[in-house]
Image (cartoon, helix red, strand yellow):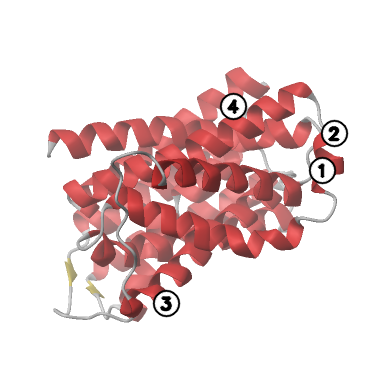
Amino acid sequence: MNKKAFWMAVITIMIWSSGFAGVRASLLGGYTAAHLVLLRFLIASGVFLLYAFWPGVNMRLPEKKDLVRIVFLGFMGISVYHIGLTFGVQTVSAGTASMIIGSAPVFTSIIAVIVLKERMDLFGWIGLGIGFIGIILITIGSSGASFTISKGTIYILIATIGTSIFFVFQKPLLERYNPIDLTAYFTWAGTLPMLVFMPGLWENIQEASTAAHVSALYVGIFPAAIAYATWAIALSAGNTTTLSSMLYLEPALAIMIAWFWLSEWPSTLSLIGGAIAISSVFVVNFIGKKKYYKGSDPL
Protein backbone atom coordinates (compact mmCIF):
# COMPACT_ATOMS: atom_id res chain seq x y z
CA MET A 1 0.00 0.00 0.00
CA ASN A 2 1.12 3.54 -0.74
CA LYS A 3 2.78 4.89 2.46
CA LYS A 4 1.06 8.25 2.19
CA ALA A 5 -2.35 6.59 1.85
CA PHE A 6 -1.59 4.24 4.76
CA TRP A 7 -0.58 6.95 7.22
CA MET A 8 -3.40 9.27 6.21
CA ALA A 9 -5.83 6.38 6.82
CA VAL A 10 -4.26 5.63 10.22
CA ILE A 11 -4.63 9.27 11.30
CA THR A 12 -8.22 9.30 10.06
CA ILE A 13 -9.22 6.14 11.91
CA MET A 14 -7.70 7.32 15.19
CA ILE A 15 -9.53 10.66 14.99
CA TRP A 16 -12.85 9.21 13.82
CA SER A 17 -12.72 6.59 16.58
CA SER A 18 -12.63 9.36 19.17
CA GLY A 19 -15.56 11.19 17.56
CA PHE A 20 -18.23 8.86 18.94
CA ALA A 21 -17.22 9.53 22.54
CA GLY A 22 -16.67 13.23 21.80
CA VAL A 23 -20.21 13.68 20.47
CA ARG A 24 -21.71 11.79 23.38
CA ALA A 25 -19.66 13.82 25.87
CA SER A 26 -21.03 17.06 24.41
CA LEU A 27 -24.58 15.74 24.64
CA LEU A 28 -24.09 14.65 28.26
CA GLY A 29 -22.68 18.12 28.98
CA GLY A 30 -25.84 19.96 28.00
CA TYR A 31 -25.94 20.30 24.21
CA THR A 32 -29.04 19.21 22.35
CA ALA A 33 -28.41 16.90 19.39
CA ALA A 34 -29.72 19.48 16.90
CA HIS A 35 -27.55 22.30 18.20
CA LEU A 36 -24.45 20.13 18.57
CA VAL A 37 -24.50 18.83 15.01
CA LEU A 38 -25.00 22.37 13.69
CA LEU A 39 -22.28 23.86 15.90
CA ARG A 40 -19.65 21.26 15.03
CA PHE A 41 -20.21 21.75 11.30
CA LEU A 42 -20.22 25.50 11.58
CA ILE A 43 -16.81 24.99 13.19
CA ALA A 44 -15.74 22.54 10.47
CA SER A 45 -16.98 24.91 7.75
CA GLY A 46 -14.97 27.69 9.39
CA VAL A 47 -11.84 25.51 9.31
CA PHE A 48 -12.27 25.00 5.58
CA LEU A 49 -12.91 28.72 5.05
CA LEU A 50 -9.56 29.41 6.71
CA TYR A 51 -8.02 26.86 4.36
CA ALA A 52 -9.68 28.48 1.32
CA PHE A 53 -8.26 31.91 2.16
CA TRP A 54 -4.86 30.65 3.28
CA PRO A 55 -2.01 32.29 1.31
CA GLY A 56 -0.96 30.10 -1.59
CA VAL A 57 -4.12 27.99 -1.65
CA ASN A 58 -5.92 28.17 -4.97
CA MET A 59 -9.15 26.19 -4.71
CA ARG A 60 -10.58 24.91 -7.96
CA LEU A 61 -14.25 25.76 -8.38
CA PRO A 62 -16.52 22.76 -9.05
CA GLU A 63 -17.56 22.19 -12.66
CA LYS A 64 -21.26 22.58 -13.41
CA LYS A 65 -21.58 18.90 -14.30
CA ASP A 66 -20.32 17.94 -10.83
CA LEU A 67 -22.42 20.31 -8.72
CA VAL A 68 -25.40 17.98 -8.31
CA ARG A 69 -23.14 15.08 -7.30
CA ILE A 70 -21.20 17.23 -4.81
CA VAL A 71 -24.38 18.61 -3.21
CA PHE A 72 -25.96 15.15 -3.07
CA LEU A 73 -22.88 13.54 -1.50
CA GLY A 74 -22.51 16.44 0.93
CA PHE A 75 -26.10 15.89 1.99
CA MET A 76 -25.74 12.11 2.39
CA GLY A 77 -22.22 11.97 3.84
CA ILE A 78 -22.41 15.05 6.07
CA SER A 79 -26.06 15.99 6.75
CA VAL A 80 -27.71 12.54 6.88
CA TYR A 81 -24.78 10.76 8.47
CA HIS A 82 -24.01 13.25 11.22
CA ILE A 83 -27.60 14.18 12.04
CA GLY A 84 -28.44 10.47 12.32
CA LEU A 85 -25.35 9.71 14.40
CA THR A 86 -25.77 12.68 16.75
CA PHE A 87 -29.45 12.03 17.41
CA GLY A 88 -28.68 8.32 17.76
CA VAL A 89 -26.01 8.57 20.44
CA GLN A 90 -28.42 10.38 22.71
CA THR A 91 -29.69 6.94 23.69
CA VAL A 92 -27.09 4.54 22.26
CA SER A 93 -23.62 4.23 23.78
CA ALA A 94 -20.63 5.48 21.79
CA GLY A 95 -19.17 1.97 21.47
CA THR A 96 -22.43 0.44 20.26
CA ALA A 97 -22.89 3.26 17.75
CA SER A 98 -19.39 2.65 16.38
CA MET A 99 -20.20 -1.04 15.84
CA ILE A 100 -23.35 -0.22 13.88
CA ILE A 101 -21.40 2.29 11.77
CA GLY A 102 -18.72 -0.39 11.41
CA SER A 103 -21.23 -2.47 9.46
CA ALA A 104 -21.32 0.20 6.72
CA PRO A 105 -19.47 -2.06 4.21
CA VAL A 106 -22.47 -4.42 4.33
CA PHE A 107 -24.75 -1.61 3.15
CA THR A 108 -22.07 -0.47 0.71
CA SER A 109 -22.15 -3.92 -0.91
CA ILE A 110 -25.95 -3.82 -1.20
CA ILE A 111 -25.80 -0.37 -2.82
CA ALA A 112 -23.12 -1.61 -5.21
CA VAL A 113 -25.32 -4.56 -6.21
CA ILE A 114 -28.45 -2.45 -6.76
CA VAL A 115 -26.97 0.72 -8.25
CA LEU A 116 -23.66 -0.32 -9.81
CA LYS A 117 -25.07 -3.67 -11.02
CA GLU A 118 -22.29 -5.47 -9.17
CA ARG A 119 -22.54 -9.23 -8.96
CA MET A 120 -21.65 -11.28 -5.90
CA ASP A 121 -21.21 -15.00 -5.61
CA LEU A 122 -22.73 -17.25 -2.94
CA PHE A 123 -20.15 -16.32 -0.31
CA GLY A 124 -20.93 -12.65 -0.83
CA TRP A 125 -24.61 -13.18 -0.11
CA ILE A 126 -23.78 -15.41 2.87
CA GLY A 127 -21.59 -12.59 4.18
CA LEU A 128 -24.45 -10.11 3.87
CA GLY A 129 -26.74 -12.48 5.75
CA ILE A 130 -24.18 -12.85 8.54
CA GLY A 131 -23.85 -9.06 8.64
CA PHE A 132 -27.56 -8.55 9.18
CA ILE A 133 -27.58 -11.13 11.97
CA GLY A 134 -24.81 -9.14 13.64
CA ILE A 135 -26.73 -5.87 13.23
CA ILE A 136 -29.84 -7.47 14.74
CA LEU A 137 -27.84 -8.65 17.76
CA ILE A 138 -26.30 -5.18 18.23
CA THR A 139 -29.79 -3.69 18.03
CA ILE A 140 -31.22 -6.09 20.62
CA GLY A 141 -28.19 -5.56 22.86
CA SER A 142 -28.57 -1.78 22.71
CA SER A 143 -32.27 -2.06 23.56
CA GLY A 144 -31.77 -3.82 26.87
CA ALA A 145 -32.21 -7.33 25.43
CA SER A 146 -35.75 -6.54 24.32
CA PHE A 147 -36.95 -6.99 20.76
CA THR A 148 -37.87 -3.34 20.36
CA ILE A 149 -35.75 -1.14 18.11
CA SER A 150 -34.91 2.14 19.79
CA LYS A 151 -35.13 5.44 17.94
CA GLY A 152 -31.41 5.88 18.51
CA THR A 153 -30.63 2.65 16.70
CA ILE A 154 -32.85 3.63 13.76
CA TYR A 155 -31.10 7.01 13.50
CA ILE A 156 -27.69 5.33 13.45
CA LEU A 157 -28.77 2.78 10.83
CA ILE A 158 -29.94 5.66 8.62
CA ALA A 159 -26.59 7.34 9.21
CA THR A 160 -24.82 4.14 8.19
CA ILE A 161 -26.70 4.00 4.88
CA GLY A 162 -25.88 7.68 4.28
CA THR A 163 -22.14 7.20 4.79
CA SER A 164 -22.20 4.05 2.63
CA ILE A 165 -23.62 6.05 -0.28
CA PHE A 166 -21.01 8.74 0.36
CA PHE A 167 -18.12 6.25 0.20
CA VAL A 168 -19.42 4.50 -2.93
CA PHE A 169 -19.80 7.60 -5.07
CA GLN A 170 -17.04 10.02 -4.04
CA LYS A 171 -14.12 8.17 -5.67
CA PRO A 172 -14.73 9.47 -9.25
CA LEU A 173 -14.65 13.05 -7.98
CA LEU A 174 -11.38 12.44 -6.13
CA GLU A 175 -9.80 11.56 -9.46
CA ARG A 176 -10.49 15.10 -10.75
CA TYR A 177 -10.33 17.36 -7.67
CA ASN A 178 -7.87 18.13 -4.92
CA PRO A 179 -9.05 15.98 -1.96
CA ILE A 180 -9.04 18.84 0.56
CA ASP A 181 -10.90 21.14 -1.86
CA LEU A 182 -13.50 18.45 -2.43
CA THR A 183 -13.89 17.80 1.30
CA ALA A 184 -14.48 21.52 1.82
CA TYR A 185 -17.26 21.53 -0.78
CA PHE A 186 -18.87 18.43 0.77
CA THR A 187 -18.71 20.07 4.21
CA TRP A 188 -20.23 23.35 3.09
CA ALA A 189 -22.97 21.59 1.12
CA GLY A 190 -23.75 19.31 4.07
CA THR A 191 -23.80 22.14 6.60
CA LEU A 192 -26.44 24.22 4.80
CA PRO A 193 -29.38 21.87 5.60
CA MET A 194 -28.33 21.93 9.26
CA LEU A 195 -29.10 25.65 9.49
CA VAL A 196 -32.68 24.61 10.20
CA PHE A 197 -31.39 23.91 13.73
CA MET A 198 -30.20 27.52 14.21
CA PRO A 199 -33.06 28.75 16.49
CA GLY A 200 -31.96 28.48 20.12
CA LEU A 201 -28.31 27.71 19.35
CA TRP A 202 -26.87 30.65 21.29
CA GLU A 203 -29.04 29.88 24.34
CA ASN A 204 -27.91 26.24 24.27
CA ILE A 205 -24.24 27.30 24.07
CA GLN A 206 -24.74 29.40 27.20
CA GLU A 207 -26.38 26.50 29.06
CA ALA A 208 -23.82 23.80 28.20
CA SER A 209 -20.87 22.99 30.45
CA THR A 210 -17.24 23.90 29.81
CA ALA A 211 -16.41 20.24 29.20
CA ALA A 212 -19.19 20.10 26.59
CA HIS A 213 -17.74 23.18 24.85
CA VAL A 214 -14.29 21.58 24.71
CA SER A 215 -15.75 18.36 23.29
CA ALA A 216 -17.83 20.27 20.72
CA LEU A 217 -14.77 22.23 19.61
CA TYR A 218 -12.78 19.00 19.36
CA VAL A 219 -15.35 17.10 17.28
CA GLY A 220 -15.82 20.16 15.05
CA ILE A 221 -12.14 20.62 14.25
CA PHE A 222 -10.82 17.07 14.24
CA PRO A 223 -13.40 14.36 13.34
CA ALA A 224 -15.58 16.74 11.28
CA ALA A 225 -12.86 18.63 9.38
CA ILE A 226 -9.31 17.28 9.63
CA ALA A 227 -10.21 13.57 9.51
CA TYR A 228 -12.44 13.99 6.44
CA ALA A 229 -9.57 15.78 4.69
CA THR A 230 -7.01 13.10 5.62
CA TRP A 231 -9.41 10.35 4.50
CA ALA A 232 -9.94 12.08 1.14
CA ILE A 233 -6.16 12.33 0.73
CA ALA A 234 -5.85 8.62 1.55
CA LEU A 235 -8.56 7.66 -0.96
CA SER A 236 -6.99 9.79 -3.69
CA ALA A 237 -3.61 8.12 -3.16
CA GLY A 238 -4.60 4.54 -2.43
CA ASN A 239 -6.89 1.64 -3.22
CA THR A 240 -10.44 2.16 -1.92
CA THR A 241 -11.07 -1.48 -0.97
CA THR A 242 -7.77 -1.85 0.88
CA LEU A 243 -8.22 1.42 2.76
CA SER A 244 -11.84 0.64 3.62
CA SER A 245 -10.73 -2.64 5.21
CA MET A 246 -8.72 -0.58 7.72
CA LEU A 247 -11.98 0.93 8.98
CA TYR A 248 -12.73 -2.41 10.64
CA LEU A 249 -10.38 -1.27 13.43
CA GLU A 250 -12.54 1.75 14.21
CA PRO A 251 -15.17 0.07 16.46
CA ALA A 252 -12.51 -1.52 18.67
CA LEU A 253 -10.70 1.80 19.11
CA ALA A 254 -13.99 3.66 19.65
CA ILE A 255 -15.04 1.23 22.38
CA MET A 256 -11.71 1.66 24.20
CA ILE A 257 -11.84 5.47 23.91
CA ALA A 258 -15.45 5.55 25.17
CA TRP A 259 -14.40 3.33 28.08
CA PHE A 260 -11.60 5.73 29.10
CA TRP A 261 -13.45 8.96 28.31
CA LEU A 262 -17.03 8.14 29.40
CA SER A 263 -16.71 4.89 31.37
CA GLU A 264 -19.11 3.32 28.85
CA TRP A 265 -18.95 -0.31 27.78
CA PRO A 266 -21.37 -1.96 25.30
CA SER A 267 -23.51 -4.89 26.41
CA THR A 268 -22.15 -8.40 25.85
CA LEU A 269 -24.82 -9.07 23.20
CA SER A 270 -23.86 -5.91 21.33
CA LEU A 271 -20.19 -6.90 21.42
CA ILE A 272 -21.03 -10.34 20.01
CA GLY A 273 -23.19 -8.74 17.33
CA GLY A 274 -20.42 -6.28 16.49
CA ALA A 275 -17.89 -9.08 16.07
CA ILE A 276 -20.30 -10.97 13.80
CA ALA A 277 -21.16 -7.89 11.71
CA ILE A 278 -17.52 -6.95 11.21
CA SER A 279 -16.51 -10.54 10.40
CA SER A 280 -19.20 -10.56 7.70
CA VAL A 281 -17.42 -7.69 5.98
CA PHE A 282 -14.37 -9.92 5.58
CA VAL A 283 -16.57 -12.62 4.05
CA VAL A 284 -18.10 -10.17 1.58
CA ASN A 285 -14.87 -8.42 0.60
CA PHE A 286 -12.22 -11.11 0.78
CA ILE A 287 -14.01 -14.43 0.23
CA GLY A 288 -16.99 -13.44 -1.91
CA LYS A 289 -15.80 -12.59 -5.40
CA LYS A 290 -17.47 -9.58 -6.99
CA LYS A 291 -17.83 -8.71 -10.64
CA TYR A 292 -18.38 -5.19 -11.87
CA TYR A 293 -19.97 -3.93 -15.02
CA LYS A 294 -17.37 -1.60 -16.51
CA GLY A 295 -18.30 2.00 -17.06
CA SER A 296 -21.30 2.01 -14.73
CA ASP A 297 -21.80 5.53 -13.38
CA PRO A 298 -25.22 6.02 -11.76
CA LEU A 299 -25.00 9.76 -11.12
Q: Could you tell me how far apart the alpha carbons at marks 1 and 4 are, in whole angstroms? A: 28 Å
Discs 1/4, front: 1
Q: Could you tell me how far apart the alpha carbons at marks 2 and 3 are, in whole angstroms? A: 37 Å
Residue with the most extreme top position = 260
Mark number displayed over residue 258 = 4
Q: Is residue 4 above or below residue 166?
A: above
Which residue was labeled with disc 2? 206
Discs 2/4, front: 2
The amino acid on which the numbered mark 2 sits, given as a three-letter code, is: Gln
Q: Secondary structure at mark 3?
A: helix
Which residue was labeled with disc 1? 202
At 49% from the left edge and 54% from the top edge, which residue is drawn? 187
Are discs 1 and 2 less than 8 Å apart at CB? yes
At 66% from the left edge and 25% from the top edge, which residue is drawn? 214
Percent from the top left, x then y, of residue 152? 70, 52
Percent from the top left, x then y, of residue 54? 38, 39
Percent from the top left, x then y, of residue 249? 37, 35
Q: Secondary structure at mark 1?
A: helix
Q: Could you tell me how far apart the alpha carbons at marks 1 and 2 are, in whole angstroms? A: 6 Å
The amino acid on which the numbered mark 3 sits, given as a three-letter code, is: Val
289 or 3: nearer the viewer = 3
Which residue was labeled with disc 3? 68
